[in-house]
Amino acid sequence: MSTDMQQLFNQLSATLMGDLLTGEHLALSIAGENSIFIRFSQAKIRQSGVVEEAELGFSLIHEGRRITSSISLSGRLESDLAIARNELIRLRLEVVQLPQDPYLVIPDSTLVSCQIHKGHLPSASACADELVPPMQGVDLAGIWASGRIYKGSTNSAGGSHWFARDSFSLDYSLISTNGKMVKSTFAGTDWNPTEYREFLQQSINKLELMTKPAISIEPGAYRTFIASAGVADLLGMFSWNGLGEAGIQQQQSAFGKMRNQGAVLASGFSLAEDFTTGLVPRFNDDGEMAPECMELIGQGALTNTLVSSRTATEYELACNFAAEGEYLRSPNMAIGELQETDILAALGTGIYLSNLHYLNWSDMIGGRITGMTRYACFWVEEGVIKGPIENMRFEGSIYQIFGDNLQAVTDTAQVNPDVGTYSGREFSATVCPGILLKSFQLTL
C-alpha cells in the first residue's frame, strides 16, 4: 500500500460527496497504519512483519435517520472507489428502513486542518541491531511496534481533517528466575538508543529487586506510592461512565457526586483534555474540533465534562465536541512538587506500586474502584525497598485516591501510550505523574 493515503482519501471523499442525492448528508473517516511489528520471547526475535492497512468509515444521514459502516481499502484508487460507491448505494437503500433518531446531529463543521508529526524511527532492517543487544542477559517478552498511524475526516458540509504521527513502542515484561515480572513500555517519536538502554536498565534494576523473597503483608490500609503507569490505569476508569456528560445526566457516573452533591477532590489534583501534546487528533469522526485544551477538573473541582453533539442536543447543553462515546482522548494530569529522587524518603514505610491491573468499578455511582497490584510492587521500610509483595486486591474510591488521601504529586509526568492493536495501533496516551497517598486499602 504505497499510495499516498491522504491523497487517496481526498479523492474518495470528493467523488462520494459528489454522488450524494438531495437531502443526504455524509461523513467519512479513515484510519490506518504502516507498521513494523516484532515479537520477542526470551530476548530473542520470534516473529516480525509489516502491516499496512486502512479502513474507510461511512456515516450517512437522510431524513432524520443515520446508518454507519466501514470497508477496507487496498490503496488502489480505481478498485477502492468502486467498492466505496457500491457501499454508499447499499447504505442509501438501508437507511430508509431505520427509525428516525430524535437526537441526530447533522455534521456541519466546515473547518479544515492538517497535522503531520514526523519522527525518526529505526528502519525494519535496523530494528534487530538496535533492540536486541541491550536485552541480553535478561528474559524479556514483548512487542515492538513502529511506523506511521493516521486518521482523516471529511463531511458533506465541507469540513476536512488529516492527522498523521510517526511513533514507536516496545511494550515488554522482564521475567525473573523465580517467576516474578517487571512490566514497562518504552515509547516515543524520535528513537534514541542511549535513552533506550537507560530505560531498559531501570527495568533490569527493578527485576533484581524482584529476586528477593516475596513479602506477605496483611490486608489493611498503607501509605502508598503509585507510579505514573498505575495512575494512568486509574485515570483510564474516568472514561467508563466517568467524565462523559451523558453518564452524569443519566445518573450512571462516578462524578455525579461532584455535580450534584458538591463533592470535591484534592486541591493538588487537576486534569485536562489536552491536545497540545500532538499525540492525538483534535477532530472526531464527524469532523468536529474539540478545544485545544480544556480543563476538566481544576484543583479538585469539576469544571467541565465531555459533551458530544448528541448529548448536547438531547439535554440542550453547550457542546465541546467530544467523541460520540464521551471518553478521554488525550488526558493530561497536572504535576506537583514531589521530586522523583525523594519518592522513597517521602513514602517512608509502606508500599510502592509500579503497575495496577484488572481495574473495574465496584460501585460506579459511589466512585469505588477495585483491581489488583501487579508486577514490580514493593514493600518499603524507612525509605528502603525490602522486597516485592505478593499480588493483592485493592479497593478505593476516587474521592479517597485523588481526594482525601492524596498527599503529594510528583514533579515529572510520563507519557503512557495505549499499546492496543485490536483494530489498529492506537493514538491515545495518558500523560500523568505519580502520586503519594496517605492511605490505600488492600483488601485480600
Image (spheres, rainbow, N blue to C red):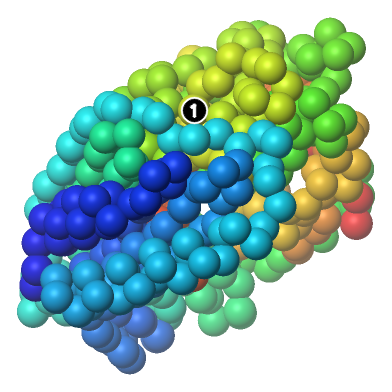
* Figure check: 367 above or below 360: above
Residue at the far front: name it: 22
Query: To which quarter of the image does residue 281 belong?
Result: top left
Q: Is residue 157 left or right of residue 59?
A: left
* Figure check: 69 above or below 162: below
Q: Position of residue 229 (x, y in %)?
A: 53, 46
* Figure check: 156 above or below 360: above
Q: Residue at x 59, y 58 (%)?
A: 96
379 or 274, nearer to the observer: 274
Q: Which residue is mark 1?
A: 321
The answer to whether residue 148 is visible is no
Q: If the image is split into quadrants, where does the C terminus sit?
A: bottom right
Q: Residue at x 19, y 38 (%)?
A: 115
Q: Residue at x 72, y 32 (%)?
A: 246
Query: Element at badge 1?
Result: loop
How many numbered markers are drawn? 1
Q: Position of residue 409 (x, y in %)?
A: 56, 23
Could you tell me the amino acid type at mark 1? Answer: Phe
Q: Is residue 111 left or right of residue 89?
A: left
Q: Is residue 242 left or right of residue 304?
A: right
Q: Position of residue 194 (x, y in %)?
A: 16, 53
255 or 378, nearer to the observer: 255
* Figure check: 417 above or below 76: above
The answer to whether residue 141 is visible is yes
